[in-house]
């Protein structure tokens, strides 16, 4: 037997034990809460969880390294299913210009926007991008996020998109963080092909995706499907090529306009449709009747001062809702899923339990990781976080959240 850890004196243990698949409707409010609990960890996995007084084999406790939760709230490590973490520098000039009233188009014409991040990535070496990514991963972990989905999308040509995915692979090899890589070559049209979007779509489908698949650098492919970016038929072409190469689909959908993106995601059986700021009754009904997660990104709405997506309508219709940070240098420089949970409650009328379910069990399901992550039950990875709090509702109640006492990844304390 390897390392054995006993976490005891847990005031509230949110096990999230429930359906194996997506949580919907009333299921989102069920946290599997156990009071005065303990969790036994063996070899990095959950061996037992329950009320401490009911622990079946006290002898195992004596042979374990103790971790005192001090009456706090323990729950699964957050799973963030939508991030853009590979870039060189923050877009601080864009931020100031936006505060002074400049539009996205004006910022882009002045050399800012997504293309400024593209220029940074293209001008950086792989090692420089790894060095920039590592402290961001540490910030995610210190904020309680133990797994992220991470996209490329700031290269916009084969060499630089593959470079970004290799950066994710290299950084993941020497970090406790679990990284799920997504190819987002169709994030925007590169400047060298301005006005030639059809040519770029073919380049993504016929050149980039085969190279990504040959190197095994991604699990998913994503497309920014919106007015001014890529249209549904273009997204269909790209995602068909991705499927042929063994990549599953995700989709930026209904953020800026309604052009049929979320309905395309449902039609293609995509793992998730993300943003959904403009989703109406038809889009909500389609998502509710599907196995495509409705991934909401309220930190970007907060940062940009935009209306929030219809979380309450999606939940009430029975959609499988997830939450993510949308961490990126332009519209959501946010590491904290705890802050996202607070926004989900205060700005989108989600209940704390619903938001926690969306940030753990449902998020893991949307990444195909629900058999190993997202709940606290025997056999799953011991990815756990402990808040210095008496009640799980404090996570949403306090702006910025209560302090994290510790973070555990695969049974090892890392904070």
Image (tube, grey):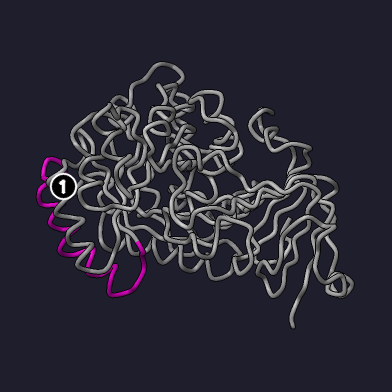
Front residue of 112 and 58: 58
Residue in the picture at 51% in, 41% down: 28
User: Is residue 108 part of the magenta span, yes or no?
Assistant: no
**Where is mark 1, residue-wise?**
193
Front residue of 168 and 389: 389
Residue in the picture at 39% in, 63% down: 165
Residue 141 vs 330, above or below: the answer is below
Image side of residue 168 versus residue 195, left or right: right
Residue in the picture at 39% in, 53% down: 151
Provide residue 296's location: percent of width, then percent of height. Answer: 42, 37
Extent of the magenta region:
194-219
Image side of residue 76 versus residue 187, left or right: right
Front residue of 105 and 217: 217
Where, by quadrant of the figure, is residue 388 drawn? top right
Determine if residue 362 is in view.
yes
Provide residue 161's location: percent of width, then percent of height. Answer: 32, 59
Provide residue 53's location: percent of width, then percent of height. Answer: 85, 57
Determine if residue 328 is in view.
no
Instruction: Name the quarter where the C terminus is drawn.
Output: bottom right
């Amino acid at each position: 037997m390897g390392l054995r850890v006993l976490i005891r004196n847990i005031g509230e243990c949110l096990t999230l034990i429930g359906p194996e698949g997506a949580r919907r409707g009333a299921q989102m409010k069920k946290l599997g809460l156990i009071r005065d609990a303990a969790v036994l960890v063996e070899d990095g996995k959950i061996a037992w969880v329950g009320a401490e007084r009911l622990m079946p084999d006290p002898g195992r406790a004596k042979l374990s390294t103790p971790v005192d939760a001090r009456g706090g709230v323990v729950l699964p490590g957050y799973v963030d299913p939508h991030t853009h973490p590979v870039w060189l520098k923050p877009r601080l000039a864009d931020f100031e210009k936006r505060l002074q009233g400049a539009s996205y188009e004006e910022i882009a014409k002045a050399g800012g926007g997504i293309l400024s991040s593209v220029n940074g990535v293209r001008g950086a070496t792989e090692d420089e991008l790894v060095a920039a990514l590592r402290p961001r991963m540490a910030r995610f972990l210190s904020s309680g996020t133990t797994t992220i989905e991470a996209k490329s999308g700031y290269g916009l040509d084969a060499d630089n998109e593959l470079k970004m995915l290799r950066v994710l692979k290299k950084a993941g090899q020497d970090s406790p963080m679990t990284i799920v890589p997504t190819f987002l070559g169709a994030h925007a049209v590169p400047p060298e092909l301005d006005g030639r979007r059809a040519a770029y779509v073919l380049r993504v489908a016929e050149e980039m995706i085969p190279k990504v698949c040959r190197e095994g650098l991604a699990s998913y492919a994503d497309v920014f499907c919106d007015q001014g970016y890529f249209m549904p038929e273009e997204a269909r072409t790209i995602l068909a090529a991705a499927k042929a190469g063994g990549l599953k689909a995700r989709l930026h959908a209904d953020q800026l306009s309604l052009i049929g993106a979320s309905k395309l995601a449902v039609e293609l059986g995509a793992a998730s449709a993300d943003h959904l700021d403009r989703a109406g009754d038809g889009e909500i009904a389609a998502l509710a009747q599907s196995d495509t997660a409705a991934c909401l990104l309220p930190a970007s709405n907060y940062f940009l001062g935009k209306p929030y997506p219809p979380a309450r309508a999606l939940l009430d219709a029975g959609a499988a809702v997830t939450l993510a940070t949308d961490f990126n240098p332009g519209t959501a420089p946010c590491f904290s899923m705890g802050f996202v949970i607070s926004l989900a409650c205060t700005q989108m009328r989600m209940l704390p339990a619903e938001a926690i379910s969306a940030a753990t069990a449902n998020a893991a399901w949307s990444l195909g990781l629900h058999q190993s992550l997202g709940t606290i039950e025997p056999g799953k990875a011991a990815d756990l976080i402990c808040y210095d709090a008496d009640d799980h509702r404090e996570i949403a109640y306090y702006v910025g959240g209560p302090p994290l006492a510790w973070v555990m990844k695969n049974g090892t304390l890392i904070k």
